[in-house]
Image (cartoon, rainbow, N blue to C red):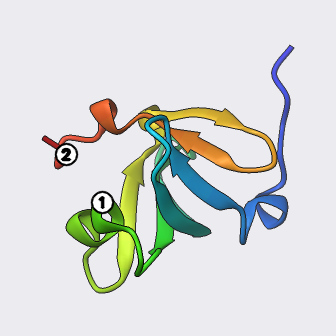
């Protein structure tokens, strides 16, 4: 059974890569208007993180939803699933 999480509960959660980099904090999600599915997480970039600064545009990191591996006390993302990371 899938666990549903209310978006308000996610706002402010840390977003961390599977390699341990703190990318920043979740601020919003981009949703496909036709399907209603989340396409991207919008993350306020951690200014102290080299990876977050590399990925950010205007202070935000756009994380594809398929890169999310876990949601608990923080949101874990696999940067291998992010096309702009080498």
Q: Position of residue 55 (x, y in %)?
A: 25, 63
Residue 35 drawn above or below residue 57: above
Residue displayed at 48% across by 35% down: 18
Return the x and y of residue 25 as percentages of the image width and height. Answer: 60, 69
Specify whether 25 is left or right of 40: right
| Position of the N terminus by quadrant | top right
Horizontal placement of 53 versus 13: left or right? Answer: left
Q: Residue at x 25, y 77 (%)?
A: 57
Number of numbered discs visible in the structure rendering: 2
State the mark number for residue 76.
Answer: none
**Image quadrant occupied by the C terminus:** top left
Q: Pick whichever, 66 or 21, lies toward us.
A: 21
**17 above or below 28?**
above
Disc 1 crowd, CA 10 A, few/some/many (<14, 14-19, 20+): some
- Quarter location, residue 4: top right
Q: Could you say which quadrant of the image residue 71 lies in?
A: top right
- Residue in front for this viewpoint, 26 or 1: 26
x 51%, y 41%: residue: 35
C-alpha separation, residue under disc 1 versus residue under disc 2: 9 Å
Residue 28: tell me if it is visible: no
Residue 58: percent from left, percent from top = 29, 86
Mark toward the start of the polypeptide (1 vs 2): 1
Q: Which residue is mark 2?
A: 85
For label 1, the SS is helix
Marks 1,2: beta carbons within 8 A: yes
- 52, above or below 70, in the image: below
Q: Secondary structure at mark 2?
A: loop
Q: Which residue is mark 1?
A: 51
User: In this view of the protein, can residue 86 be seen by the observer?
Assistant: yes
Is disc 2 surrounded by few (<14), some (14 to 19) or many (20+) residues within 10 Å? Answer: few
Of circles 1 and 2, the one toward us is: 1
């Amino acid at each position: 059974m899938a666990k549903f999480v209310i978006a308000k509960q996610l706002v402010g959660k840390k977003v961390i890569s599977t390699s341990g980099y703190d990318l920043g904090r979740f601020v919003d999600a981009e949703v496909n208007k036709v399907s209603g599915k989340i396409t991207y997480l919008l993350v306020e970039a951690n200014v102290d993180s080299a990876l977050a600064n590399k990925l950010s545009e205007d202070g935000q990191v756009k994380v594809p939803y398929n890169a999310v591996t876990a949601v608990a006390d923080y949101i874990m993302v696999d940067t291998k699933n992010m096309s702009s990371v080498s």
